C-alpha cells in the first residue's frame, strides 16, 4: 500500500526538517538575535564576533548604516544618527516630555512622531525596521536559509500602539512575526528551562529605555504571569543623563549644541559602565567650542545622583507584588534582566528589598533573546522535549464609555491572554438606531481620566423603546496583546467591529501614572461615579415624564397639578447640575411621589381605552 506524505498548508512536507526560527530582543540600547541549535538556545554573532548590535541607525544621503558603524557617527552627525528609537515607538511629538534634549529635527505632524534626516522624513517604525533587517540578515547568513518566523520581545508595559508599531516594523523588515512576547516572560522562559526552576519568581527588567517588573509562577513548563507593572520611560538612558547634567554643572559651560550633547552622553554612558567594576572613573573630552571637560566621578557621587531613579523602580515593584497577592517571603528568586541591572546600586537595592541576592547567572543582556528563541522554536513547529505553556497578562484594563462619561471595564488588568470577553449594553433613547462605541484603556472610573483607544459606530439598530435593544460588545486580546472589538445587535444581527490600531501611544509616564492615579483617586472616583450614575438616572426620569406630559398632560392634569409637577422637575434639573448624588436621589424620590397621581390617571385612561367597545365576556383574564 502506498503512503501519502501530507503536510499542512505552508508547512514543510519533510517530517524531520528543522524550521528556522529566531527570537529577537529589540532593545533601546542594543539588540540581538538568538535561535535554538541542538536543543540549546544560543545567541547569533556577526562576522566580527559581536553578539550585541547597537540600536543605532545613521542615515546618509545614499544609504544607511546600522549598529557599530552607525554608533561611531553619533557624535559627528547627531541629527542623522538615531539612538534609543525604542523610546519613540508609538509616540507623538507632544508625548515626549524632554524633547528639547534630543539633537534631532522633529517634524510636528499628527500621529506618530517623525524625524527629518538627510535621507528624508523617517518615523520610528522605519528606523526600527532597519535594525530588524540587519538582525534578519545576520540570522539567515548564520543559519544558511530563509527564516520561517521570529518572536520579537516588547516591554510588558508597552501599550497597544507601541506593540502594533513594533509588529509593523518587523513586517516592514520582511519578518514573519510568530508572536510578540513580553520581555520579562521571555527571561522567565530562559531561566525556567535552563535551571528547571519552579515557584514564584520576580523578573526585574531594567533596560536602556524601559523598566518592567513581572511576578510569575513557574510550574512544570507553565509560565503564569500573576501581575506586571513598570515604567515605559525609565532606563539606563536616564542614568546617563544624570551624569551628563552633573558634568555640565561641574564644568559650568554654556548650553551645548547637538554634537557636544551626543559626545557628552556617550562619555556619560562610558563612565557609568566603568563604575560597574571600579570605584571611580575619569571623564575627559574636548568640546567643539574648545572647552575641556576633565572630571573624576566616584561611585558615591553617582549613587547620590541616581538614588531617585533607583527608587522609581521599587514603587512599581511593590504594586506588582500587591496585585499578585504575593509577599516578599513568597518569592523564590529575583531574575535580573537588562544591561542596566549591572549597576551595583541596582543590585544592592534589589537585594535589600527582597532580602536575597538576585539571580545573575545568565547574561542579563542576552537572557531575553534566549527565551524568545525557545518560544520561537515551539511556535515554528519544531519538536521540543520541554512542554511549554505561556500565560501572559494585559497591563491595563480595557473597557467602554457608558452614559455620563463612565468607564465600564470589560477586561480587567492582569487578565491572562489571549482572552475574549463580551458584555451586553442597551440604548438610552426611544427609537435609537445607532450607537457610538468608545474603547478606552485605564483604571479610573471616568473616561476623561483614561486613555482613548478607538471609536466606531454600530448602525441599523431597529427602532425600539429605550432599554429594549440588546447590543453585545465583544473584546478579544490576542497572544501579542493586540485588541479587536466588535458590536452586534442581538435581535436583527447587525454588526460592526474595529481592530484597535492607534496612531501613537501613551505619554512618557502615562502608563505608570494611570495605575498610580487609580489608587490615589479611588475614593474620589467612587464619588464621581455615584454622581454620574445618579445624573444619568435622573435624566432618564425627566425625559420619561416630559414625554408623558406632552402626550397626556393637558387632558389629565389641572393647571395647579401640572405646575406642581413641573416645579419638582425643575428642582431635579437643578440638582443634576450640582455635585451631590444624595441630593439628586432625594429630588428623584420627590418627583416620583409627585407624579404618582398623574401616572395612576394615565394607567386608568389606558385601561379604559383598551376596554372601550368590548363586552365583559370578551375580556380574557
Image (cartoon, rainbow, N blue to C red):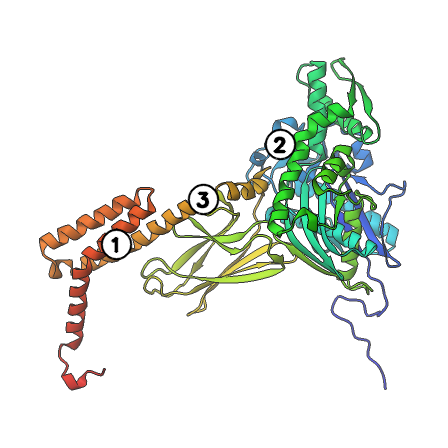
Measure how far apart labels 2 and 3 are at the Cα level: 41 Å
Q: Earlier in the sequence, mark 1 or mark 3?
A: 3
In the picture, measured across the screen, residue 176 lies left or right of residue 419, that is right
Residue pointed to by mark 3: 523
Q: In which image quadrant can residue 504 be found?
A: top right
Q: Residues within 10 Å of mark 2 (few under 14, many from 20)?
A: some
Q: Residue visible at 45% across and 68% down?
A: 493
Q: Are discs 1 and 2 less than 8 Å apart at CB?
A: no
| Above-or-below relation of 241 to 147 | above
Q: In which image quadrant can residue 3 be found?
A: bottom right
Measure how far apart labels 1 and 3 are at the Cα level: 26 Å
Residue pointed to by mark 2: 106
Q: Residue visible at 84% across and 27% down?
A: 278
Is residue 162 visible to the viewer in this orientation of the structure? Answer: no
Q: Residues within 10 Å of mark 3 (few under 14, many from 20)?
A: few
x, y (%) of residue 112? 59, 41
Q: Earlier in the sequence, mark 2 or mark 3?
A: 2
x, y (%) of residue 93? 58, 35
| Above-or-below relation of 52 to 290 | below
Q: Earlier in the sequence, mark 1 or mark 2?
A: 2
Measure how far apart labels 1 and 2 are at the Cα level: 58 Å
x, y (%) of residue 291? 75, 13
Quick one: SS at disc 3? helix
Residue pointed to by mark 1: 589
Q: Quadrant of the N terminus?
A: bottom right
Closer-to-camera residue (518/24): 518
Amino acid at each position: 500500500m502506498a503512503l501519502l506524505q501530507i503536510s499542512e498548508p505552508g508547512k514543510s512536507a519533510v517530517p524531520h526538517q528543522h524550521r528556522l526560527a529566531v527570537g529577537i530582543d529589540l532593545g533601546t540600547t542594543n539588540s540581538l538575535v538568538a535561535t535554538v541549535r541542538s536543543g540549546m538556545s544560543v545567541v547569533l554573532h556577526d562576522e566580527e564576533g559581536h553578539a550585541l548590535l547597537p540600536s543605532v541607525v545613521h542615515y546618509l544621503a545614499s544609504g544607511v548604516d546600522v549598529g557599530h558603524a552607525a554608533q561611531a557617527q553619533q557624535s559627528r552627525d547627531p541629527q542623522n544618527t538615531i539612538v534609543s528609537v525604542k523610546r519613540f515607538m508609538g509616540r507623538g511629538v507632544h508625548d515626549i516630555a524632554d524633547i528639547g534634549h534630543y539633537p534631532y529635527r522633529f517634524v510636528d505632524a499628527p500621529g506618530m512622531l517623525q524625524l527629518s534626516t538627510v535621507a528624508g522624513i523617517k518615523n520610528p517604525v522605519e528606523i526600527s525596521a532597519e535594525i530588524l533587517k540587519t538582525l534578519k540578515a545576520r540570522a539567515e547568513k548564520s543559519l544558511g536559509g530563509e527564516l520561517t518566523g521570529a518572536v520579537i520581545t516588547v516591554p510588558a508595559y508597552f501599550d497597544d500602539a507601541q506593540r502594533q508599531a513594533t509588529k509593523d516594523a518587523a513586517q516592514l523588515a520582511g519578518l514573519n512575526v510568530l508572536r510578540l512576547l513580553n520581555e520579562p516572560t521571555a527571561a522567565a522562559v530562559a531561566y525556567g528551562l535552563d535551571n528547571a526552576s519552579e515557584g514564584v519568581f520576580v523578573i526585574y527588567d531594567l533596560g536602556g529605555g524601559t523598566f518592567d517588573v513581572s511576578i510569575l509562577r513557574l510550574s512544570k513548563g507553565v509560565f503564569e504571569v500573576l501581575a506586571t507593572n513598570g515604567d515605559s520611560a525609565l532606563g539606563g538612558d536616564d542614568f546617563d543623563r544624570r551624569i551628563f547634567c552633573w558634568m555640565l554643572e561641574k564644568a559650568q559651560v554654556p548650553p551645548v549644541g547637538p554634537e557636544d550633547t551626543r559626545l557628552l552622553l556617550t562619555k556619560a554612558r562610558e563612565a557609568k559602565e566603568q563604575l560597574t567594576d571600579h570605584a571611580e572613573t575619569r571623564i575627559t573630552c574636548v568640546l567643539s567650542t574648545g572647552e575641556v571637560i576633565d572630571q573624576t566621578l566616584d561611585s558615591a557621587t553617582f549613587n547620590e545622583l541616581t538614588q531617585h531613579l533607583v527608587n522609581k523602580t521599587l514603587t512599581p515593584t511593590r504594586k506588582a507584588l500587591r496585585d499578585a497577592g504575593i509577599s516578599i517571603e513568597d518569592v523564590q528568586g529575583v531574575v535580573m534582566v537588562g544591561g542596566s541591572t549591572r549597576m551595583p546600586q541596582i543590585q544592592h537595592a534589589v537585594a535589600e528589598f527582597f532580602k536575597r541576592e538576585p539571580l545573575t547567572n545568565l547574561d542579563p543582556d542576552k537572557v531575553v533573546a534566549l527565551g524568545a528563541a525557545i518560544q520561537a522554536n515551539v511556535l515554528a513547529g519544531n519538536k521540543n522535549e520541554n512542554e511549554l505553556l505561556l500565560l501572559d497578562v494585559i497591563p491595563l484594563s480595557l473597557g467602554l464609555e457608558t452614559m455620563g462619561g463612565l468607564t465600564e471595564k470589560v477586561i480587567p488588568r492582569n487578565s491572562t491572554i489571549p482572552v475574549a470577553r463580551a458584555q451586553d449594553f442597551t440604548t438610552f433613547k426611544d427609537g435609537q438606531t445607532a450607537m457610538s462605541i468608545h474603547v478606552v484603556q485605564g483604571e479610573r472610573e471616568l473616561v476623561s481620566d483614561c486613555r482613548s483607544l478607538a471609536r466606531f459606530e454600530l448602525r441599523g439598530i431597529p427602532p425600539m423603546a429605550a432599554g429594549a435593544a440588546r447590543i453585545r460588545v465583544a473584546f478579544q486580546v490576542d497572544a501579542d496583546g493586540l485588541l479587536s472589538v466588535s458590536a452586534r445587535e442581538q435581535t436583527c444581527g447587525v454588526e460592526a467591529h474595529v481592530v484597535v490600531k492607534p496612531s501613537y501611544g501613551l505619554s512618557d509616564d502615562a502608563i505608570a501614572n494611570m495605575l498610580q492615579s487609580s489608587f490615589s483617586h479611588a475614593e474620589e472616583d467612587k464619588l464621581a461615579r455615584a454622581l454620574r450614575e445618579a445624573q444619568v438616572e435622573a435624566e432618564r426620569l425627566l425625559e420619561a415624564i416630559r414625554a408623558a406630559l406632552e402626550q397626556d398632560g393637558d387632558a389629565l392634569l389641572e393647571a395647579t397639578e401640572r405646575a406642581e409637577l413641573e416645579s419638582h422637575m425643575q428642582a431635579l434639573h437643578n440638582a443634576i447640575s450640582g455635585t451631590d448624588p444624595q441630593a439628586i436621589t432625594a429630588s428623584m424620590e420627590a418627583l416620583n411621589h409627585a407624579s404618582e397621581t398623574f401616572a395612576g390617571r394615565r394607567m386608568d385612561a389606558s385601561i379604559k381605552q383598551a376596554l372601550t367597545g368590548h363586552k365583559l365576556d370578551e375580556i380574557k383574564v
